[in-house]
Amino acid sequence: MSTQMDQTPDPNSIPTKKRSTRKRLRACSNHSYELTTFCEPGRPISPTGPFRDNIAVFLQQCAELTDFTVQGMNVWFTLLRSRECLVPLFTIEENVNTSKTEFCDHCLSTDWSNHFVSKRKYHMIIPKDDCWTKPLDDSVLEGATHLLHGMIHCDGIGHLLCINGLKGGSKHLCGREIMDLWDRICTNLRTRKITVEDFSKKRSMELRLLHGIAYGRPWFGRWGYRFCHGSFGVAEETYERALDILSSIELEKIIQDFSDMEECEELKRVIHCYKHWSESSLVTIKDLLKFMLTVKAGCPVQRKVRKPKPPTATTLSSLRIKSHLFADVISHNPGRHPARRQKMAADAIVHVLRENEKKGFVNGEMARQDVRDAALLHSRRRGLPIRDIGLLDNVLSKLDNVIIGNHIVCRKLHAMPGIKTGIRKYTVHDLLDGIKSLEPEKELLLPSQALVPDVYSDVLYLYKNVLLGYPESKLVQLATQVVLNTKYFVKEYRFGDKDEQEQCLDIPLPSMTDSANPAESGI
């Protein structure tokens, strides 16, 4: 390893996430692409052959060979532009002749031991944020903290080994963005099959169980991953039947079956709360969880306010006009968008204003255009259904001293030279229960009916008590265990006819670096 470290390039040639170095990085690399469109059809290449040929084209045209190696293996890197950062995508070529292991453990665990041993396999890695400015070391292939680690055999069969988004330590990329990128790469390079062992969790909840009931598929199912095989002999038919059993449990039956247990009152509260919120009828546990996950994605987490707190001298000191609850505002002026979507948009606006406040801006002050752009970006990262600019403009027009949850959003017109209409700027203020404005007759009380539930805690309560602790029901317990025992999922990529598919089988070909002349290397 010491000889490799001596060859480590200048850190300036390694991708960095600092905005101030963008120009310098572009100058040192000819391969910089937009992350959100990278590997879309024709962006930047349109390969048509089997994976073993396409990966060679990819490395030749979209990546640069580094002057350091990992365990003696060659490493390429590609820069991906994403908002305020440059994200490094490393590709490592592993040759079976020099590899520590001749066989693939992931193929063996997926019951694919009947496949031929590939001559080469390619690791695609996005390290965690604090490693973006460092060369890769020899332990990189064993790490589980990468934002992305996928491995593809030369025959087009591969495995998604690791993915970590915002909850996994990333400051810039969410899990959906990374999965979108990985899926585009696999599609563009024409892989055949990709497997994943699903260990994804949220607040200790197994997402393959939670999303399986709510959406009829695991979290990875959003990208087309389906049942591969289950532990303890679980078959696909058994898995599908287990999901049907759990998804069809009626809410009224849950209340009835828990009637003699101490959890009954809390379950009633949760169920009735979200039934009241929902614009559609919630009948089964599937309906309830799906709605709750939608609300959870659309609202920042806010704890229930239990007791009023005394006002502080600085709270709302500048607000001397009447304020309104957001629910009252949209009831008097509903507009063309559903109230639920308007509430999500308002919560997103509060979120970006508060984030701006953390950056040192007084009360999160932002211009209207900046608020809208930030809210759109927030919705894209969280996958919220509020990407309609017209919706955000409509909600922003209503936010003038309006109470949203435990905050109040205010608007002020700032005069600007050369601009007749001025610029509208928005601020956010914390609102304490029981606070009154400086005008005695205009109260800013938060009624208990307006309290926002802690959706995360409510979902976790249902998960632990209903899904994992259903009373005296062997059928529910067995169905839950079947879903939890199903961890392996696979996506099959289809392209061309049968003959073209057969051509994708791996054949011995020289490595990308076996010859300086691509024509001589068989590429």
Image (cartoon, rainbow, N blue to C red):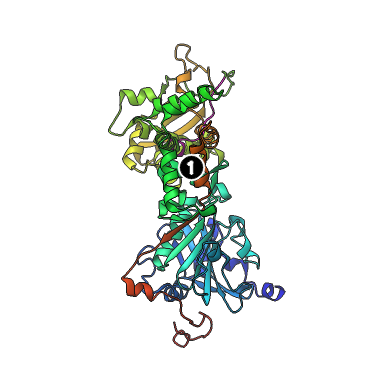
Residue 399 in percent (x, y) is at 39, 30
Q: Main secondary structure of the magenta part?
A: loop
**Is residue 173 on the magenta stretch?**
no
User: How many numbered discs, if any?
Assistant: 1
Residue 222 versus residue 466 in the image, above or below: below
Q: Residue furthest left?
A: 336
Please name the amino acid that badge 1 sits on.
Ala
User: Magenta span covers which residues?
Assistant: 295-306
Residue at x-position 51% and y-position 73%: 64
Q: Quadrant of the C terminus?
A: bottom left
At horizontal 45% and vertical 75% (from top left) the residue drawn is 52
Magenta-colored stretch includes residue 301 = yes
The image shows residue 123, relative to residue 447, as above or below, that is below
Quarter-wise, where is residue 506 in the image?
A: bottom left
Q: Is residue 144 visible?
A: yes
**Residue 383 point in image, percent of width and height:** 42, 45
Q: Residue at x 53, y 63 (%)?
A: 88
> Going by the image, does 335 lie left or right of 233?
left
Furthest residue in direction top, as rendered: 441
Estimate how packed mark 1 is, as few (under 14), some (14 to 19) or many (20 or more) residues with alpha carbons within 10 Å.
Answer: many
Residue 35: in sight, yes or no?
no
- Which residue matches tag 1? 479
Which percent across, then down, holds residue 154?
48, 73
Residue nearer the viewer, 91 or 478: 478
Q: Quadrant of residue 329?
A: top left
Residue 389 % position (x, y): 34, 42
505 relative to 150, above or below: below
